[in-house]
């Protein structure tokens, strides 16, 4: 495995089992785990796992298995929560198995089985993804299925934008300026009963409440993006009831 510097500890493609993050991931087209994951699962300090890995690598070198070491262990880097760049070691299934030989408790044997099962599942996942049909009709069918799935994902994203995203900062500023423009227009052109509304401040408060009530939100900042233009129309047409 080649050395690779990582700005952060990013796994190229993870495989999720249930609600837990996978124990293995894909890197450089290989299914691997790393010293950080092993340390976390074994509840060991990362520095101790690194030490144990390096001991096994030295034993392999002494046994004349340098090629195995080069192919199955890979030095990479990650940043911790303080921003420090630190070492970690990526391992193939074979490298992981070598490491686990040094841990002989019953608990670590159970963990070893979990990792091996994950390695197998990931390999099966990759193989299933890489099986391509040879006949033209099946290739077209696969392409159509992929396009359909993509369209569904795009449609789902559009629904999120439509139903969940609220106005951004720029749109909030537009609403604020539109409110101010409307209030000062009404105030300066005699469209307000100043005995009832004796200051523009009161008008701002009233318009704000009416706007929130109209769109059933706690703040104008919670107005949905899809309702932005409607909100502007509401403000531009607003005037106090009395």
Image (spheres, rainbow, N blue to C red):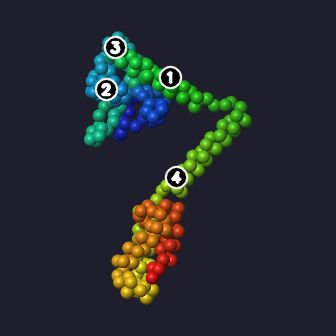
Q: Which mark is residue 160?
A: 4
Asked if the residue at tag 4 contacts the one at tag 3, i.e. Cβ–Cβ closer than 8 Å, the answer is: no
N-term mark: 3 or 2: 2
Where disc 3 sits, the SS reads loop
Q: In 3D space, how far apart are the residues under numbered discs 4 and 1 (Cα atoms)?
A: 35 Å
Instruction: Kindly report which numbered mark, 3 or 1, lies closer to the viewer in this rendering.
Output: 3
> In the displayed structure, would residue 133 be above or below residue 186?
above
Q: Residue at x 33, y 24 (%)?
A: 42
Pick the quarter of the image with the N terminus. Answer: top left
N-term mark: 4 or 2: 2
> In the displayed structure, would residue 108 be above or below residue 217?
above
Instruction: Kindly report which numbered mark, 1 or 2, lies closer to the viewer in this rendering.
Output: 2
Residue hosting label 2 = 43
Residue hosting label 1 = 120
Residue at the far right in the pictured view: 137
Pick the quarter of the image with the C terminus. Answer: bottom left
Residue hosting label 3 = 104
Near-viewer residue (145 or 159): 159
Q: In 3D space, how far apart are the residues under numbered discs 1 and 2 (Cα atoms)?
A: 23 Å
């Amino acid at each position: 495995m080649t050395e690779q510097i990582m700005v952060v500890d990013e796994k190229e493609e993870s495989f999720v089992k249930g609600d837990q993050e996978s124990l293995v991931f894909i890197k450089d087209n290989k299914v691997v785990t790393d010293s950080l994951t092993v340390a976390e699962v074994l509840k060991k300090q990362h520095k101790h796992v690194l030490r144990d890995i390096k001991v096994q690598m030295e034993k392999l070198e002494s046994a004349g298995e340098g090629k195995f070491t080069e192919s199955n262990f890979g030095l990479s880097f990650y940043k911790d929560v303080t921003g420090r760049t630190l070492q970690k070691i990526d391992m193939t299934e074979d490298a992981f198995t070598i490491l686990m030989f040094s841990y002989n408790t019953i608990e670590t044997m159970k963990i070893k089985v979990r990792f091996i099962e994950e390695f197998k599942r990931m390999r099966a996942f990759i193989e299933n993804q890489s099986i391509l049909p040879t006949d033209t009709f099946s290739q077209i069918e696969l392409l159509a299925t992929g396009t359909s799935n993509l369209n569904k994902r795009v449609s789902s994203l559009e629904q999120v934008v439509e139903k969940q995203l609220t106005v951004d900062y720029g749109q909030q500023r537009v609403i604020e300026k539109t409110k101010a423009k409307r209030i000062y227009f009404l105030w300066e052109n005699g469209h307000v009963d100043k005995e009832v509304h004796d200051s523009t401040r009161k008008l701002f408060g009233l318009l704000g409440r009416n706007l929130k009530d109209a769109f059933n939100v706690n703040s104008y900042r919670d107005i949905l993006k899809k309702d932005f233009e409607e909100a502007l129309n509401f403000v531009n047409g607003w005037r106090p009831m009395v």
